[in-house]
Image (spheres, rainbow, N blue to C red):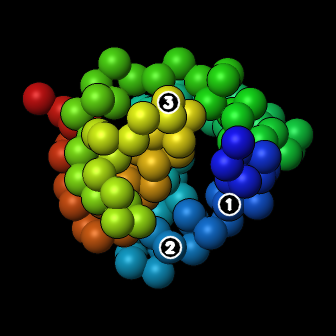
Amino acid sequence: MHRIFGISFASVYPLYIEKVERKGRSKEELDQVIEWLTGFDEAELQRHIAERTTFEDFFADAHLNPNASLITGVVCGVRVQEIEDPLMQKIRYLDKLVDELAKGKAMEKVLRAA
């Protein structure tokens, strides 16, 4: 089991906010990306943060977007589409979306809109 599986989403969420805001994006845009990937609305997201849900439980509760498989590219030197562990792949999908948001990609592209 990877160490990150047991880390609380709440401990990483502020780092995601900091990263996107440093690049001129907003917390609301980040939340939109998280909602797109996981299916969590604002109340569900806040509940996971308040309960300090682990990444393992966070993604176990999520309804992954059917277009998540369109997320491709490299995170931490590894191609997300080639990650074999399903939970690690979901975590890296989120990392990749946060990276794209922070890099200024248009929201339609980040959310894999047609």
- Residues under labels 1 and 3: Cα distance? 19 Å
Q: Quadrant of the C terminus?
A: top left
Q: Residues within 10 Å of mark 3 (few under 14, many from 20)?
A: few
Q: Which quadrant of the structure image shows residue 100? A: bottom left
Q: Residues within 10 Å of mark 1 (few under 14, many from 20)?
A: few
Say which residue appears at 34% left-offset and 57% top-offset.
Answer: 78
Q: Position of residue 47 (x, y in %)?
A: 80, 35
Mark 3 residue type: Pro
- SS at mark 1? helix
Q: Quadrant of the N terminus?
A: top right
- Tell which of 17 and 77 is nearer to you: 77
- Residues under labels 1 and 2: Cα distance? 11 Å
| Residue 37 to residue 21: above or below | above
Badge 3 is on which residue?
Answer: 86
Q: Position of residue 4 (x, y in %)?
A: 68, 53
Say which residue appears at 57% left-offset and 74% top-offset.
Answer: 18
Q: Residues within 10 Å of mark 2 (few under 14, many from 20)?
A: many
Q: Earlier in the sequence, mark 2 or mark 3?
A: 2
Query: Residue 29, can we see it?
Result: no
- SS at mark 3? helix
| Residue 45 to residue 100: above or below | above
Look at discs 1 and 3 and give the one toward the viewer. 3
Q: Earlier in the sequence, mark 1 or mark 3?
A: 1
Mark 1 residue type: Val
Say which residue appears at 29% left-offset and 29% top-offset.
Answer: 69
Q: Which quadrant of the structure image shows residue 24? A: bottom left
Badge 2 is on which residue?
Answer: 19
In this picture, residue 100 sits left or right of residue 49: left
Badge 1 is on which residue?
Answer: 12
